[in-house]
Image: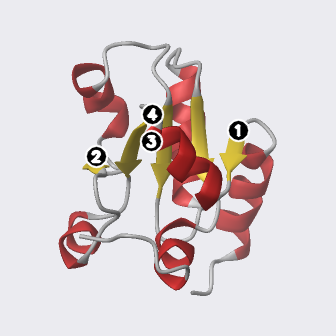
Amino acid sequence: MDHGPGFLAIVDATRMRVKECTIAEAQARVAAGARLIDVREQSEWAAGHVAGAEYLGKGVIERDIEAMVPDKGAEIILYCGGGFRSVLAADALQQMGYTDVCSMAGGWREWVALGAPVA
């Protein structure tokens, strides 16, 4: 997917403030109890998602995260299609006081390419 230069500039600036994890790291962390949240659009989620993931779209994550994950110290891993929107969402959660958030680099596309479990 081609992203506009303005969008990429925002993501690159934000990426410096956000932890990113590999898919292997995300899998290990989820196995140890981390919450895995898909921040893509509802239509993307419906077409397929990481097995065991929860859904909370980027458009409403700031509004709904505190009800879904009230513990601001909980380990949260966010993913999107390619690891761009999840960086922006992770930054928003950190601004809200969540202290253990990471964005899964490569997102859904890399997850699928690696043959990891999907639903």
The reply to whether callout 1 and callout 2 are in contact (CB within 8 Å) is no
Marker disc for residue 31: 3
Q: Secondary structure at mark 4?
A: loop
Which residue is tagged 1?
A: 18
Q: CA distance from mark 4 to mark 3?
A: 7 Å
The reply to whether callout 4 and callout 3 are in contact (CB within 8 Å) is no
Q: CA distance from mark 3 to mark 2?
A: 20 Å
Circle 1: residue type: Val
Among the two numbered marks 1 and 3 on one chain, the one whose residue lies closer to the N terminus: 1
Who's the residue at 53% across and 66% down the image?
107
Callout 4 crowding tier (Cα within 10 Å): few <14, some 14–19, many ≥20:
some
Callout 2 crowding tier (Cα within 10 Å): few <14, some 14–19, many ≥20:
many
Q: Position of residue 79 (x, y in %)?
A: 48, 56
Q: Nearer the viewer, mark 1 or mark 3?
A: 3
Among the two numbered marks 3 and 2 on one chain, the one whose residue lies closer to the N terminus: 3
Q: Secondary structure at mark 3?
A: helix
Q: CA distance from mark 1 to mark 3?
A: 22 Å
From what the image shows, is residue 2 above or below residue 62?
below
Which residue is tagged 2?
A: 56
Position of 37 with respect to 93 (left or right) is left
Who's the residue at 26% across and 75% down the image?
48
Which residue is tagged 4?
A: 34
From what the image shows, is residue 114 above or below residue 66?
below
State which quadrant residue 17 falls in. Answer: top right
